[in-house]
Image (tube, rainbow, N blue to C red):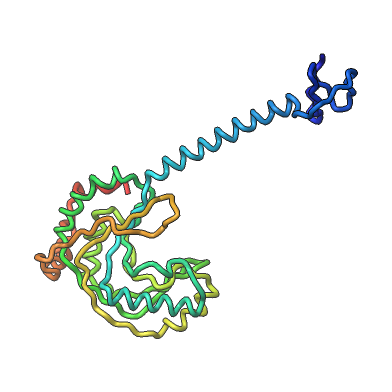
Amino acid sequence: MQYFNSINTVKIRCNQCYYPSATVHPSGRTATFLPSFYLLKKFRFNYKIAKNISNLVLLNFKAMTGYQDYLIILSPPEDVSEQVKRLKYSSSAVIGEYEGLFSKAHITIQPWMRKKPVWVGPLIPKLERDLQNLPTITLTIDGFDFFDHQDTFTIYAKLVSTPATKAWFKSLRKYFNTPPFEPHITIARTISKDNFNKLWPYFKNKEWKQDFKVDSLTILNRDHIGYNKSYKIYKEMPFNPRINFDDFTQLKLKAPHLLINKASTQQFSLF
C-alpha cells in the first residue's frame, strides 16, 4: 500500500496497512488512529534540537558556576554601620525600597567581577604581604553629598579628604591598578531623579561628624550565577599597626615616586 505523508494527514491502522483518514478500508475492519510518519519524524527532530539546546544551556550554566564575583572593600566599625542602616531605612520610608537598601556599610575599593577562584587564590599571599607596607588609617565622616549620574543619583556619607588620606588611598590603589575615585559610604545608590528630589532635602543640611579607624582590608565574594546574590567574607587582611600614619604619609608626600615599586603591582593587573 502507498503511504501518505501529508502534514495534515492522520492515518488509520488496520491489521494489514495504513490508510488516510478520508479513505475507507475495503475490509471494513476496526481501525485505530496513530500520528502520521511525517509528524513522528518531525517530533523526533524537534526533540533532538530541544535536547541539544538544553544540554548546551546546562553546560554553560555549569561553566559559569565556576566563576565568582569579588568585592574589595574597607569596613567601618559596627557603630558606623548601624547608623548607615538607620539612615537607609529612613530613606526607604520616603522613597520606598531601592537597590542596595540592605547592603552593609562599606567603602568600595574595587570590584572583581566574574573571576575564577583559581585565579584569585594565588594572589592572596602576595597581597597580604604588600598590605603590611600600609599603616592603619583614621577617616572622618562629615555630612553628606551626592553623585550625579545624569539619569540617576547616589547619596552618600562624605569622608574628609586631606593630602595625607589621598596619599594613603593612592598607595592602596597601586596594588590593584585602580584609577582615582572618591572614597565614600553609600546611603542610597542609583535612585531616580524624582526619588532624589524627595530624599535629598533630608540630607542636604543633615549633620554627621564622626571619626573611625580602618585597620584591615576585606575581600567579599559570591557566586557569579545563583539564587543567593549576597556577598560573604572571603578574606580579611590587616594593615600594619606598627607603621606610624603621619610618618608614612609625610614620606609619600615628599617622595611620591617611592609610593610603590611598579613591579610589585603587576600581579593584579589582570583585574
In the image: residue 33, left or right of residue 208: right
- Location of residue 187 in the rendering, given as x and y in whole percent from the top left corner: 40, 73
Q: Is residue 53 above or below residue 22?
A: below
Q: Is residue 207 above or below residue 250?
A: below
Residue extending farthest top: 1
The residue lying at 42 percent from left, 81 percent from top is 203
The residue lying at 41 percent from left, 57 percent from top is 229
- Location of residue 223 in the rendering, given as x and y in whole percent from the top left corner: 38, 51
In the image: residue 36, left or right of residue 101: right
Residue 179 shows up from this direction: no
Quadrant housing residue 128: bottom left
- Location of residue 135 in the rendering, given as x and y in whole percent from the top left corner: 15, 65
Q: How many marks?
A: 0
Q: In which quarter of the image is the N terminus?
A: top right
Quadrant housing residue 71: bottom left
Residue 166 shows up from this direction: yes
Report the front residue among 121 and 37. 37
The residue lying at 45 percent from left, 54 percent from top is 227
- Location of residue 2 in the rendering, given as x and y in whole percent from the top left corner: 82, 15
